[in-house]
Image (cartoon, rainbow, N blue to C red):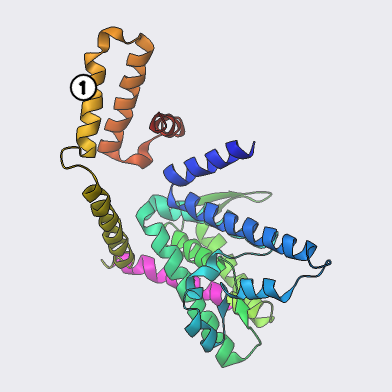
Amino acid sequence: MLKSIWEDLKREYNFGNMISRLMIINVSVFVILNLVKIILYASNGGQIPEVYNDILYFFCMSSDWRHILTHPWVIITYAFVHESFWHILWNMLFLYWFGRIVGDFIGNHRVLPIYFLGAITGAVMFYLSANLLNYGGDFMLGASGSVMAFVVAAGVLSPDYIMRLILIGDVKLKYIVAVLVLLDLISIANSSNTGGHFAHIGGAIFGWVFVASLRNGTDLASPMNSFAQWVNNLFRRKQKSRMPAHRSPLVVIKHRNESRKSQTAEQSPIDDDYQLKLDAILEKIKEKGYESLSDVEKDFLYRASKK
């Protein structure tokens, strides 16, 4: 069973969209963190040792500039850390609902930059509010700032988009977004998780700015995507340099196809059908991209890659 779950997760991570990958990473970190907590709890006589907090704070956003200076990664990593089941459940549901809308409207390639930049904006808002208002917020964790960036971005992109809510029915997206932002503002006034709600507002502001900038011709995701492409090309060049000059991947694929054609007389109709289906899927990817494939086609391609 565990092997089957692992294969499903690996397939979804490799062939799913960026929202699916972010959810898998968040849930994985949640599971690992809680397993560590259980092990430390059981090995310490039913008490959670201080080392657990040290591990947690190593990845959490802090209101102390010294902690940020010595742990600069926390402005991103805190957005992947959850302790509470309900915390991660609602964050992942909102990420799935609103993130998919954003990805469908402006492209899957902008999802990761929005997540990262929403997290950074939320971290900045948390730091400034904690130090200027002095409400006692020391550390912050959770993807809520990033999620609120998707919530507001979705609302700005398509305010009249209809979502069906349980017990309520069809509601326009703009009203859902307005209520969520209003709840954050009310929570700040009521001193309920003040730092976290300031981070939500920071993420919400970034979501609005991102879409507004995109409409004005400025893609805030472009620098991050350009850097990711540069890194990807760098690794590809390294891999290519390790291959024999006369054996590029395209040549290998062509050789395999020619070998199959030369053995047509020995192949069964099932083999021919398999190759035709694989060729059709590859042609579809070439013309329309991987995201155009159905779940059945993605599964077929995944199994074909294992052969």
**Observer-nearest of 40 and 285:** 40
Find residue 164 and report its horizontal and vertical position in percent: 58, 48
Q: Quick check: is 213 in the magenta stretch?
A: yes
Q: In which quarter of the image is the N terminus?
A: top right
Identify the residue at horizontal 56%, vertical 42% (top origin). Answer: 6
Position of residue 228 relative to residue 131, above or below, is: above
Identify the residue at horizontal 69%, vertical 77% (top origin). Answer: 192
Q: Quick check: is 177 in the magenta stretch?
A: no
Query: Which residue, as the protein is rendered here, is positioned at the far right?
Result: 45
What's under tag 1, amino acid-wise? Answer: Glu
The answer, for residue 94, to whether it is visible in the render is yes
Identify the residue at horizontal 59%, vertical 91% (top origin). Answer: 133
The residue to which callout 1 is attached is 258
Query: Which residue, as the protein is rendered here, is positioned at the far top?
Result: 265
**Observer-nearest of 168 and 31:** 31
The answer, for residue 107, to whether it is visible in the render is no
Find residue 37 and report its horizontal and vertical position in percent: 71, 64
Find residue 231 and report its horizontal and vertical position in percent: 30, 60
Rendering quarter of residue 255 = top left
The range drawn in magenta is 198-216
Using residue 174 as the reference point, say whether residue 260 is left or right of it: left
Rendering quarter of residue 58 = bottom right
**Main secondary structure type of the part rendered in magenta:** helix
